[in-house]
Each structure stands twice: as structure tokens, then as C-alpha cells.
């Protein structure tokens, strides 16, 4: 008969809270010693879900163990339904940005094209919000440049008006675009409303991918114009047909079904994950984005589910299909929520073969290459930080660096900026800009003292977490920065250096001579980059 082991893993203090949790849907939060959320999760059954964290620590992944090691508080909120839990979870993650959740730094709305066929003279316009206003929206596109290039492509083929006003303003003479063949001249009565609307309907057909129908219509109109001996009008239709054919040759058609799809590929290693999303619109790949999920915890299905819950919502476009590379436990719940956002059915699909499989493989490969590139960059960055640590005699790697710069125009309109780099990369959410209040005449040391003081006063917690502060300037600026740091008791906490522009010299407190880094030094490139970024942000 086997002998039971008497060795027990110490029970986590928060495990005692499980008994007080209800068997209801809701949201739970693990919090740190300061009461800040470390992780926000949702559950169909709060009691069962949270209990899973404490049943067998040996079966937990490294990041979950790290989470539990830091967690000292457990909070929960009961919701009426799973969908309410999903929405609350998403809201709390966006509000608190917990360390162990999937956090998307790119939360902007992507540009799209809008046209309202109910207008007397419709026009294509670039927008960043999808509204339920009866207009037609096409996109989103991955960047403003991509959508502008699409407009430049469309204007010669379908010369709709480009004036900004919603209502057409009558003019005596048409604009320059009319002379260039890029506008039908509706403002000057050069086209009938019926013909103009026909052109607007044609651009909609093109954007919807119904190019066969469009080409057939244009061919019929060309032949009809030629039959009535209106050869000039027939030539217009001929040119449009040729332009469409040329455009279609350049486009890479990925789907013969001409649907809107977002394709999510994920690649993980022991240190994190990268998610790549391909935007396919009407069968055409229009762009891609990638997201670093380095702190997020969970398997592929959990990470993809968390990404979907964070990425969509608000005014962001929701496609009719989302292709994923893993089965999602919450697929039905997410489809229901996404369908409500879109106002139509949305399907989350996996695929083993065919066009969808090809797209998923492409997204997976993009995610893998992005992650490998990031890892190679991080290895080089780590080496650079180690060299900088050695040169500046720092007690720790300068992972969190700040640079403070003063910029002014002949002593007027002086502005101070603080930029933050983390692991050698800009952390733009932490940038700060200040107008100089106390000086009207040029006095760089005094201005530097004011900005350092205001930064420490406003952002003392952020400042205390810095591994290095660089002030743009020589011994004078460095000296006042040291004095202000001393007033806040941070002299021993935050190392500081001055960077003088003329010879790119680095000055350290209590060191009489400057440090000149080799011109090819990666450490020099890094401090120059953060200094230049501080100057750019100030002006």
C-alpha cells in the first residue's frame, strides 16, 4: 500500500478567500501591496475559476506563479451575465493596465473611407470612427498613408468631388481637379446629378470587390456611348476600364469570397508572445499590425481571447470574420458580443486547409518573425545597457532612463520636456512637457532646476523608478539637477548625468573630468537618441 507524502506545499494566504466567493459570473482582481491591480480576470463561476489558482501550484505556468507571489489582495465583482463580466473586465483592464493582462499600447482607431449615397453629390472622406449613420464605411486601413494611397488610386478612376464641405457649394468655374480629370465638376454644373450618382455607385462596387459587375457595367456604357457616336464619353469609360484592370493586376487577392477578415497569428516563447493581425478587406490584404504581449499570461487560446476583448469595441471596425489559430473556450460569448458591436453576425473561425489556412499561416509567420526580431533587438539592447552601466559606474542596468531638455526661441516661449526610455525604447505615454514659468530671460541652469523640480513634484513615483536621469547640458545643468534631487531625497536613488552637445561629453557628479564615448559606441547612440527625442518633443 503506497505511503502518503507528509510534505505539503505552503497554502497561499489568499486561498482562504475562496470560501467567500459566489458561484456567479463576475470579475476578479489580484492586487499588490499598494492595492493596484496586478491581474483582472472574468469568470462564469467566480468560485470555481479562482479556486483553480490554488489547487496545485506546481501545474501553474511561470507567469501565474509570479503573479501569485506578488498578490496580497483578492477582490471581486458579481455581474448578471457572462457578457457583463466581459465588458467590465475590458473596462477595468483599460483603466488600470494591470501588469499581467494583455495590454495593447496601440489603442487608436484606424482610418477608413466613408461615403453616403443619400447625399445629392456624395464624396469619399477619411474618418476614424465607424458610426451607425446609414453611410457606407470601407476599411479600416492600417495607416493614414495607406488610406491616402487608396484615395489617390480611386480619384482618377472615379472622379468624385474632393472639396471638404458636406454640401456642394456652387461655383462659377470648376476647381483645378476638374482640369486634371480628377473631379466631375459638379459644383459648376459640368455633370448631371444622375451621372454623378452613377460614378458614386461605381466606386462603391469597386470598394466592395464587385469588380466583375463594375467592369461589365462600364463596358456596356462604353459600347452604348460609341453606338450613339459619343466617342469622347466612350473614351472616358474605356480609360476607367483600363485603370481598373491595371489596379487589379497590382492587388494581391487572398480570398475569392471577397469578405472582410481580421487574421490573428500568435507566436510564443518562454519570455512572452507576439500577436500579428492581418487586415483583409474584400479579399485584398491591405495591411498588418503586430503587438508585443510580453507580460501577458495564459495559453494561446486565452491570449487570443484577451486580445479580441481589448482590441474591438467602441468605434473600431468589426469584420464579419476573425480567423484564429487556436480554439477559444469563450468563442460563443465573444461572437455574441462582436455581433452586437457590428449589428450583424460575426464568426470566429479556425481553419485546417484552403484560403483561410493560408492566411492563418501567413499571420503566424509574421508573428514569429516579429518576435524573433524583437528578441534580437533586445539582446543588442541588453548589451548596450550593460556597457552604459559600466561606463557610468551605475549600480544597475539603466532600463528606465529619462532625459530632460530645455528649448527656447531667443529666450522666449521656453519649454522643458521629459522623455522616458524603457529598455532602450521610447515610452511615449510617460512623456511630459512643461512651459517655463519662472524665467523670461535665457538662464539654462535656472530653467533646468524649475523643470526637474516640477517633474519630481508631479511624478515623484515615476522619477523614483528611474535607473538614470540625463540632463541636456554641462556641469551647470547637472549641478542644479543634483541639488533638486537632494531636496526630494533622491540623490542616492536616481543616478544623474549631464550630456553637453558640443563634444557629446558626459558629466557625472563628483567627477572633475568628462567622459567621451567612442564615436561608434552604441551607448553614445542611445544617449544621443534619448537627448534628440527630448529636444524633438519639446519643440
Image (cartoon, rainbow, N blue to C red):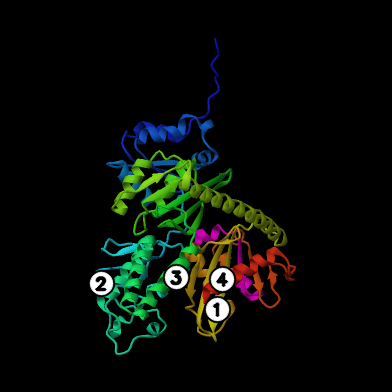
Which label lies toward us, 4 or 2? Answer: 2
Question: In the figure, is residue 457 to the left or right of 185?
Answer: right
Front in this rendered view, residue 303 or 456? 303
| Helix, strand or loop status at disc 2 | loop
Q: Earlier in the sequence, mark 3 or mark 1?
A: 3
Using the numbered discs, state the Cα–Cα distance from disc 4 to disc 1 in whole angstroms.
9 Å
The residue depicted at 52 percent of the width and 69 percent of the height is 453
At 39% from the left and 82% from the top, the residue drawn is: 177
Residue 293 visible somewhere in the drawing: no
Q: Mark 3 or mark 2, which has the lower sequence index?
A: 2
Position of residue 86 measured from the top left corner of the image (x, y, whole percent): 35, 46
Q: Is residue 337 left or right of residue 145?
A: left
- Label 2 vs 1, first from the N-terminus: 2
Residue of label 1 = 407
Question: Residue 242: which disc?
Answer: 3
Dot placed on the residue nearer the N-terminal end, 4 or 3: 3
Q: Which residues are magenta?
A: 459-482
Residue 123 picture location, percent across and down:
32, 73
Dot 2 corresponds to which residue?
A: 119
Dot 4 or dot 2, earlier in sequence: 2
Distance of label 2 from label 1 (alpha carbons): 49 Å
Amino acid at each position: 500500500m503506497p505511503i502518503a507524502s507528509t510534505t505539503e506545499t505552503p497554502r497561499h494566504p489568499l486561498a482562504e478567500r475562496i470560501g467567500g466567493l459566489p458561484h456567479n459570473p463576475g470579475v476578479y482582481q489580484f492586487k499588490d501591496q499598494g492595492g493596484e491591480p496586478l491581474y483582472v480576470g472574468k469568470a462564469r463561476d467566480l468560485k470555481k475559476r479562482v479556486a483553480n489558482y490554488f489547487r496545485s501550484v506546481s501545474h501553474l505556468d511561470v507567469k501565474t506563479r509570479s503573479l501569485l507571489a506578488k498578490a496580497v489582495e483578492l477582490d471581486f465583482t458579481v455581474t448578471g451575465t457572462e457578457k457583463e463580466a466581459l465588458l467590465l473586465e475590458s473596462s477595468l483592464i483599460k483603466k488600470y493596465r494591470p501588469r499581467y493582462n494583455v495590454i495593447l499600447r496601440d489603442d487608436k482607431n484606424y482610418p477608413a473611407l466613408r461615403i453616403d449615397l443619400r447625399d445629392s453629390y456624395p464624396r469619399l472622406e477619411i474618418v476614424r470612427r465607424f458610426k451607425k449613420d446609414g453611410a457606407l464605411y470601407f476599411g479600416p486601413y492600417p495607416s493614414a498613408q495607406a488610406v491616402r494611397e487608396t484615395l489617390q488610386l480611386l480619384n482618377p478612376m472615379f472622379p468624385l468631388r474632393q472639396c471638404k464641405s458636406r454640401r456642394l457649394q456652387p461655383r462659377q468655374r470648376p476647381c483645378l481637379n476638374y482640369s486634371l480629370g480628377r473631379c466631375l465638376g459638379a459644383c459648376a454644373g459640368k455633370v448631371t446629378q444622375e451621372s454623378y450618382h452613377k460614378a458614386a455607385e461605381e466606386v462603391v462596387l469597386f470598394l466592395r470587390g464587385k469588380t466583375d459587375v463594375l467592369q461589365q457595367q462600364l463596358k456596356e456604357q462604353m459600347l452604348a456611348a460609341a453606338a450613339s457616336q459619343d466617342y469622347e464619353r466612350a473614351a472616358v469609360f474605356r480609360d476607367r476600364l483600363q485603370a481598373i484592370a491595371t489596379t487589379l493586376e497590382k492587388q494581391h487577392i487572398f480570398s475569392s469570397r471577397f469578405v472582410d477578415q481580421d487574421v490573428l497569428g500568435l507566436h510564443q516563447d518562454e519570455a512572452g508572445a507576439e500577436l500579428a493581425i492581418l487586415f483583409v478587406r474584400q479579399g485584398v490584404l491591405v495591411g498588418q499590425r503586430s503587438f508585443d504581449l510580453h507580460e501577458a499570461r495564459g495559453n494561446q487560446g486565452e491570449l487570443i481571447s484577451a486580445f479580441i476583448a481589448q482590441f474591438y469595441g467602441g468605434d473600431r471596425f468589426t469584420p464579419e470574420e476573425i480567423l484564429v489559430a487556436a480554439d477559444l473556450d469563450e468563442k460563443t460569448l465573444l461572437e455574441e458580443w462582436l455581433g452586437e458591436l457590428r449589428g450583424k453576425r460575426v464568426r470566429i473561425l479556425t481553419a485546417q486547409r484552403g484560403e483561410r489556412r493560408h492566411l492563418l499561416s501567413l499571420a503566424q509567420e509574421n508573428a514569429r518573425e516579429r518576435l524573433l526580431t524583437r528578441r534580437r533587438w533586445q539582446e543588442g539592447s541588453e548589451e548596450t545597457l550593460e556597457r552604459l552601466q559600466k561606463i557610468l559606474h551605475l549600480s544597475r542596468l539603466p532600463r528606465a532612463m529619462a532625459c530632460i531638455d530645455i528649448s527656447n526661441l531667443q529666450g522666449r516661449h521656453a519649454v522643458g520636456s521629459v522623455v522616458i526610455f524603457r529598455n532602450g525604447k521610447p515610452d511615449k505615454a510617460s512623456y511630459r512637457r512643461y512651459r517655463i514659468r519662472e524665467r523670461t530671460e535665457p538662464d539654462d541652469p535656472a530653467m533646468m532646476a524649475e523643470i526637474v523640480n516640477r517633474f519630481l513634484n508631479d511624478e515623484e513615483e515615476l522619477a523614483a523608478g528611474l535607473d538614470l536621469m540625463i540632463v541636456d547640458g554641462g556641469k551647470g545643468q547637472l549641478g542644479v539637477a543634483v541639488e533638486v534631487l537632494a531636496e526630494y531625497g533622491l540623490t542616492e536613488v536616481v543616478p544623474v548625468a549631464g550630456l553637453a552637445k558640443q563634444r557629446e561629453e558626459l558629466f557625472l557628479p563628483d567627477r572633475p573630468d568628462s567622459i567621451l564615448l567612442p564615436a561608434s559606441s552604441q551607448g553614445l547612440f542611445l544617449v544621443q537618441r534619448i537627448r534628440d527625442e527630448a529636444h524633438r518633443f519639446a519643440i
